[in-house]
Image (cartoon, rainbow, N blue to C red):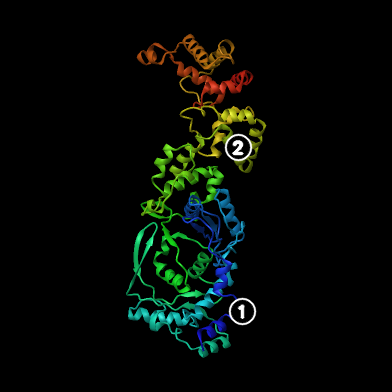
Amino acid sequence: MTNNDLANLLYPNVTKTIDDLEVMYPERNLEKNSEVTRFAPSPTGRMHLGNLYASFIPEVIAKQTNGVFIVRIEDTDQKRKIENGILLGLNDLEHYNYEVDESPIKGGKYGPYIQSKRLEIYHTVAKYLVSIGRAYPCFCSSSDLDNMRKIQESKKDRIGYYGHYAKCRNLTYDEVKEHIDRGDKWVLRLKSNGDFNNQIIFKDLVKGTIKLPDNDLDQVIVKSDGIPPYAFAHVCNDHFMRVTIVTRDDSYISSVPFHLELWNACGFKPPKFAHLLPLNIKDGDSIRKISKRKDPEAAAMFYHEKGVPVEAIKLYFATLMNSNFDGWYLQNTDKSYRDFEFSFSKMSKNGALFDLDKIISISRNYISRLSAIQVYDKLLKWTFEFDKPFYDLITKYKQYTINILNIEREQKKPRKDFSCYSEIKSYIWFMYSELFKNFNYEWQNIKDINEIKTIVTDYIDNYYDEVDDKETWFNKMKMLSDKYGYCSDLKMYKENSLSYKGSIVDISMIIRVTLTSKSMTPDLYEIMRLLGINEIKRRINLLG
């Protein structure tokens, strides 16, 4: 009996050939240097920062080469799969504005894009491998494998199914048929041609040239339930989706010899590999892989709920991917990260270390560069989901809110108060009369309430005028200071402070605190101009 007979015995219902698949999923019509990349998450929960970083890398490479970015769901681990896991993961990617070309939702000519729905492809390739003598059925039970492992341990042999330990490797057709007729369970194994004493050499886009022992293990490529493990599934999927660069965790490096043997056995041209070090986090004196179970700040939703701009997260990923991005961005603040040319060769060989402070710093800088209208629109979107009362308020006072957000924004060095949208309310709440209640005044040097009332009442009745420009406004503040014994000239005050009750700083401070309750705020002149005379007088009257 021939290998074809064995293939038909094992896969009687598979009618397509590997040539049929080549026709169904042809080479993509792309430019010469365009790359096809993919992100292949498991539907086991919401995305965390490590997932988002792992998807950022292939996405930017695909986009900067006018290529294709695929999201393929690897759901063959049914035990860890959660309800709506696929949709939740895809929604997280959408929220972070990844430009996905093909996915379970967007579709495409190279689908299905869910691993479990591609069984026909896997079985067609598996049948082909049997037909050319590169795969065979194995009927060893778990107890058989345990006994084999114990023997290998006692003899101090390498653990695995290889050589004379591969007891099902040379079963005859009749022996296989007998097992099949009895209904015995079987897995399909690759018949390895490798020699462990030899080395394979391959080039990794991140790590450079790597040498590893050749694979000689007859590893499982289709499980007894008909579902392939990762290795065989990814070879079939990446080939027939025409992926040109495989990005994945560097824990897979040791598996490369087996994977390359699979590619070659199938007659497929292997893609380029980029093995990425995971996003790590400092934990005490040690460093470990970031974990959504251990690290709340690792969850994608953590940043969504805080209102950290997705653009800031992407900028952070850009700095992790290529260290020279920081310098480039400082010189090109008007450009997008997509204008930067990313490179695998410039990725760190030591892995990226998670830095929440850097994310916050990037976020603060990013928000400071937005126009007031842009900040308003993003704040509106965030409050609609997380703070409906404030949403209603800023909707009611749209232009007023935009004007507030514009204080000290359109200048060479704009203020950098806001590191995320969730913080904005805490910085501007006092500008709304509806919220200006139940607070504590942050009085500084002048604390006597009667003196405070006297000075601010005199100021608003006899000095303040809404039509004054800033210079006139400040000069009147100086006049008020001198009137009450507070030096209007800071240089003079430093030289002879004992001659005065205080300085103009103290006078402006009591006006600031009276009107805002805060000792630190943006430009007082702009605040007063926006509040208006009636609201200013109302707040002065609140002093009692």
State the mark number for residue 377. 2
Report crowding for label 1: few under 14, some 14 to 19, many 20 or more residues within 10 A (C-alpha): few
Residue shown at 42%/72% (left/top)?
261
Label 1: element kind:
loop
Q: Relative to 333, is 444 above or below?
A: above
Q: Relative to 493, is 291 above or below?
A: below
State the mark number for residue 13. 1
What amino acid type should be assigned to the residue bearing mark 2? Asp
Between tags 1 and 2, which lies in front? 1
Q: Is residue 294 visible?
A: no
**Residue 357, horizontal then vertical, whole percent:** 44, 42
Q: Quadrant of residue 214?
A: bottom left
**Residue 488, horizontal then vertical, whole percent:** 44, 13
Q: Nearer the viewer, residue 101 or 377?
A: 101
Q: Relative to 132, is 507 above or below?
A: above
Residue shown at 49%/21% (left/top)?
509
Q: Nearer the viewer, residue 499 or 40?
A: 40
Q: Nearer the viewer, residue 524 or 347?
A: 347
